[in-house]
Every structure is written in structure tokens, then in C-alpha cells.
Image (spheres, rainbow, N blue to C red):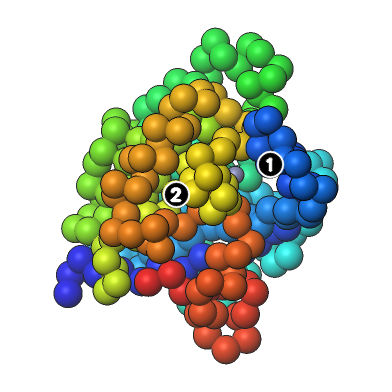
């Protein structure tokens, strides 16, 4: 079937956090609630798409995160050669989603208009709003615009049969999610539209935010796009590695199959 895709979640980094750090208004429990960092691969009849590009060792050091396996290694483990990838979808321009600038030399980058506007406009004059952004990441994307390697999207657009991007906003002004037709139905790769399962399931909000109200509305958008709650894949939940099977023997806790 032409519009049925395989989806892989490739974990590349880890960060220990306390639960209260993951929510506006905090959390009453003094428990650990770490974040996992992923990129995602979608394979279908129209080729291979990569959602987000992660960050490298230098950025991990700067931000106090730990790389578990570099992004390139994870991709090669499922036979994806970054040199030949032609389409990269960027959910948003936060440092953990758009680094590794030279990893995909042939790819064009899919980005929402509003994300570029946000990352290069007046709101970046505020230190608080700049926290999750890196100037070098934004400059790299501007250079790709001048190299005609960026495809801008507005709202909902189709990348291939059974593969659509959808503007969500909230966490970042131009955040987009990816809806993918698979053999088990429509899966939504939410990226940071919900960091953890708890955010969307309990209507709570991660502290890094452009608009709280839009984030909450985004949960409704994601639920509408996914065939069920089990078809929603959060962007940073380590539990994804437990809920889904390893893509192949030896890839446990590293690359899992979501379709
Ligand atoms: Zn983010
Ligand atoms: Zn993120």
C-alpha cells in the first residue's frame, strides 16, 4: 500500500530532571522524571523522511545533556545513510531539534513559516524566550533559505500520500507535528507538542512555552489527528522506549518501531 509507512524513534540523548522541573506550577512529588531525546525516521513508498536532527556532543556539553548514541549512529543502525536523505522535517527550532548542521548535506528542510518568523523576529530580543534557541542553529537555517534548501509550510500541508505536517504552536510559535499513515492507523509524532505522556493526558504544560493557551489547544489538535491515544508519540518520554518493540535485536533502549 502506497500510503503505509514504517516509523522509527531513535533515541540519542538523556537528561536527568526532577518532576517539578517538567511542569508549569511544578509537581508535588519529589521524584525523578528524566527526559529522553529522539529523532524519528519515516520510511515509505515516497522515500525516507527524518523528523528533527537532534544535537551534537558540543551542544550536549554546553547544555549539560548526555549523548547516549550520536544521531548518525542511530540512523545507520536502521540502514539510513544521512548523506542520501532528501527530506528533513523540523518540528521547531529549539536546540535539541535542529542541530547537527552538516549531517544531511543533500536534504531540504521542511519548516513552518511562523517558526522562522518567531526565531528571527522581535520575541528573540527577550532573554527568556531565547533560552531554548541557539543563534547558530537559526543562522544555519537562514543560510539554507538562501541556498534554496528550505520548504516553508503554513498550517496543514501534505508531504506525501499519508504524510502531513500540522501547525500546533504553543510550545514554540511555529511548532509542527507529523501525522503518518501506518498499518495500525494514523500515528502522530507530536515532538514537543507534548513532551511526556503526562502533559497531554493530564492537561499540564512544560515550562518552556510561547503560549500556554495554545499548548492546551494543541493537545486537542493532536488527539483529533491520531486514531487513538495509543497513536500519539510524545517528544521526550523515555517510556516510548518501553511501550514499543526494538526495531531489531540489539537496538533495545535505542531504536524502537512505532508502526
Ligand atoms: Zn522544544
Ligand atoms: Zn525538545
Name which quarter of the figure residue 255 lies in: bottom right
Using the image, determine if residue 15 lies above or below residue 230. Answer: above
Where is the N terminus found, in terms of image quarters?
bottom left
Q: Residue at 27% x, 66% y: name it.
A: 185
**First in sequence: mark 1 or mark 2?**
1
What SS does tag 1 mark?
A: helix
In terms of depth relative to the viewer, which is nearer, 191 or 68?
Answer: 191
- Neighbor class of circle 2 (other Cα within 10 Å; few <14, some 14-19, many 20+) is many
In terms of depth relative to the viewer, which is nearer, 69 or 220?
Answer: 220
Q: Which residue is mark 2?
A: 190
Residue 112, horizontal then vertical, whole percent:
38, 33
What SS does tag 2 mark?
A: strand
In this image, 71 relative to 111: left or right? right
Q: Which residue is mark 1?
A: 22
User: What number is the disc on residue 156?
Assistant: none
Measured Cα–Cα span from mark 1 to mark 2: 17 Å
In this image, 229 relative to 27: left or right? left
**Disc count in the image?**
2
Where is the C terminus found, in terms of image quarters?
bottom left
Residue 159, horizontal then vertical, whole percent:
26, 50
Q: Residue at 51% x, 23% y: name it.
A: 211
Q: Nearer the viewer, mark 1 or mark 2?
A: 1
Using the image, determine if residue 259 lies above or below residue 54. Answer: below
| Residue 191 shows up from this direction | no
Q: Residue at 59% x, 73% y: name it.
A: 242
Callouts 1 and 2 close, C-beta under 8 Å: no
Residue 118, horizontal then vertical, whole percent:
49, 21
Residue 128, horizontal then vertical, whole percent:
69, 20
Amino acid at each position: 500500500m502506497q500510503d503505509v509507512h514504517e516509523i522509527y524513534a531513535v533515541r540519542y540523548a538523556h537528561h536527568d530532571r526532577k518532576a517539578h522541573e517538567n511542569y508549569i506550577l511544578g509537581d508535588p512529588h519529589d521524584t525523578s522524571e528524566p527526559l529522553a531525546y529522539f529523532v524519528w525516521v519515516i520510511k515509505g513508498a515516497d522515500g525516507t523522511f527524518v523528523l528533527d536532527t537532534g544535537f551534537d556532543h558540543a551542544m550536549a556539553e554546553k547544555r549539560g545533556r548526555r549523548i547516549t548514541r550520536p544521531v548518525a549512529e542511530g540512523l545507520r543502525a536502521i540502514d539510513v545513510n544521512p548523506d542520501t536523505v532528501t527530506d528533513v522535517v523540523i518540528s521547531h527550532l529549539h536546540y535539541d531539534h535542529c542541530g547537527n548542521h552538516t549531517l544531511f548535506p543533500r536534504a531540504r528542510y521542511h519548516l513552518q513559516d511562523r517558526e522562522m518568523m518567531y526565531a528571527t523576529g522581535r520575541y528573540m530580543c527577550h532573554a527568556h524566550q531565547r533560552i531554548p534557541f541557539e543563534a547558530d542553529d537559526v543562522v544555519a537555517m537562514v543560510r539554507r533559505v538562501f541556498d534554496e534548501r528550505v520548504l516553508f509550510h503554513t498550517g496543514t500541508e501534505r508531504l506525501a500520500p499519508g504524510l502531513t505536517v500540522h501547525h500546533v504552536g504553543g510550545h514554540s510559535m511555529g511548532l509542527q507535528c507529523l501525522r503518518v499513515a501506518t498499518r495500525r492507523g494514523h500515528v502522530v509524532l507530536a515532538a514537543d507538542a507534548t513532551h511526556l505522556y503526562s502533559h497531554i493526558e493530564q492537561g499540564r504544560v512544560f515550562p518552556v512555552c510561547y503560549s500556554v493557551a495554545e499548548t492546551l489547544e494543541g493537545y486537542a489538535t493532536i488527539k483529533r489527528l491520531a486514531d487513538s491515544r495509543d497513536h500519539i508519540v510524545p517528544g521526550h518520554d523515555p517510556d516510548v522506549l518501553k511501550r514499543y518493540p526494538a526495531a531489531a535485536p540489539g537496538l533495545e533502549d535505542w531504536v524502537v518501531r512505532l508502526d
